Image: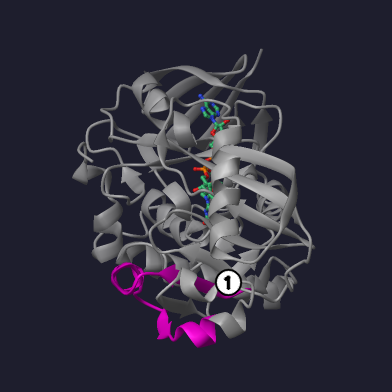
Amino acid sequence: MTTISCDVLIIGGGIAGLSLAAELAGRVRVVLAEAEPTLGYHTSGRSARQLVPSYGPPAIQQLTVRTLDLLHRRQSEAGLRVLSHRSFLLIGSKAAVKEHASGQMEFIGPDDALELSPELRPGAFEAAGLDRTSFGCRTDVLLQHHQDTARAAGARFLTGARVESARRHGSGWRVVAGGETVDAGTVVNAAGAWAEQVAALFGAQPQGLVPYRRTAAVVDVARPLSPRQPMVAAADDSFYYRPENGQVLVSPSETVPSEPEDARPRDTDVQRAIAHVSRSTTLTITGVAMAWTGLRTEPADGHPVVGFDPEVEGFFWLAGQGGYGFQTSAGIAELAAGLILGEHDGAGDVPAALSPHRRTFTR
Ligand SMILES: Cc1cc2nc3c(=O)[nH]c(=O)nc-3n(C[C@H](O)[C@H](O)[C@H](O)COP(=O)(O)OP(=O)(O)OC[C@H]3O[C@@H](n4cnc5c(N)ncnc54)[C@H](O)[C@@H]3O)c2cc1C
């Protein structure tokens, strides 16, 4: 068996690993190892596919705006068709909406909210915020685009290749992944819910990353929503829903800690989403077409962990994207590539907020 040599080995074939592979390929030799037989199988194949610039803390909002900017540019230059306009409507008590509304979000009156989403029950909310700069995203097309871009630029993909062991070798790492041996100068930990386990293989200290369950379901409704209607979310994080090709995507927005695993939906979570949506709208839900659960992994401060490990040489963190993995993907890949290639010194508000030097352990 031959040893594969590369400059950067990326562990994990979700949106984090794939967008970085596309960014680095052609500039350095890239290998990506994915444990599953297919790419994008875990959390990246299970999202709600919405990019909301007003969602999350300031560093996340900046990365989301940058990601939208980069994706819009690729849409016009490379013909990539991934974004479609879909605004985001936040509803709830005045205090809850005020607490969550920031950045691109504007306050609107309940009557304006009812005009945008006539299925809402008038008494079910007191206040509303609207983010008109939000977009729906064809995440499957985006994942494929990154894969094609990286491959065309010479990146190599190993699937069914779980990274099982690692040791220092010369000035880099020797890694065994699914029976292949890979020598790499830098290793990137983009292993999603498994990021702490992967870090342990390399002797890196934990970053306090916890996977949290989040379920979504596509339900049948008696009268479909218009595809142009916004995504609607409760400001108290009890549910969200949006149109989905004549059906409706609903979520109970649960945040329940989990082991890293191939998470499966629980009927109680799906029923809770249906109950919340039924209580707040006049939608008549007639059945559940499909349901799924993914793991949103994040540290206590809710910021991703992006940068070289402070103690372990050649080990780079690209983990903890929580519920923002798609909306920050292009911005984070750009930042990570700059740090890995030494073109970015890591200074600045956003890199500091994301740095692995800040280890967080309490929630
Ligand atoms: C219900 C739900 C709704 C969401 N909605 C949105 C949304 O609207 N907008 C948004 O921006 N984000 C959303 N998210 C969050 C987003 O999906 C995640 O942030 C993102 O997918 C995380 O990507 P990732 O690449 O870090 O992880 P993953 O996609 O999980 O990829 C990690 C990969 O690493 C692999 N791996 C693990 N260990 C090893 C190993 N030892 N060797 C090799 N490979 C390994 C795994 O097999 C996996 O494929 C949502 C998530 C959920 C669950």
Q: Secondary structure at mark 1?
A: loop
The residue lying toward the viewer, choosing from 105 and 9, is 105
In the image, taking residue 238 as reference, residue 58 lies left or right, namely left
The answer to whether 37 is drawn above or below residue 298 in the figure is above
Amino acid residing under circle 1: Leu
Q: Residue 301, percent across and down?
A: 26, 49
Q: Residue at x 47, y 82 (%)?
A: 110
Residue at 42% over, 71% down: 54
| Residue 71 pos. (x, y %) | 60, 69
- From the image, which quarter does the N terminus lie in? top right
With respect to residue 313, does 334 lie above or below? below
Q: Is mark 1 within 8 Å of ligand 1?
A: no
The residue depicted at 43 percent of the width and 47 percent of the height is 322
Q: Kindly identify which residue carries mark 1.
A: 120
Q: Position of residue 80 (x, y in %)?
A: 72, 67
Q: Quadrant of the C terminus?
A: top left
Front position in the image: 68 or 223: 223
The residue depicted at 66 percent of the width and 35 percent of the height is: 157
> In the image, is residue 150 part of the stretch drawn in magenta?
no
Q: Within 10 Å of the Cα at label 1, are there few (<14), some (14-19), or many (20+) other Cα atoms?
A: many
Q: Nearer the viewer, residue 300 or 313?
A: 300
Q: Quadrant of residue 343?
A: bottom left
Magenta residue check for 92:
yes
Q: Is residue 122 above or below residue 267?
A: below
Magenta-highlighted residues: 86-113
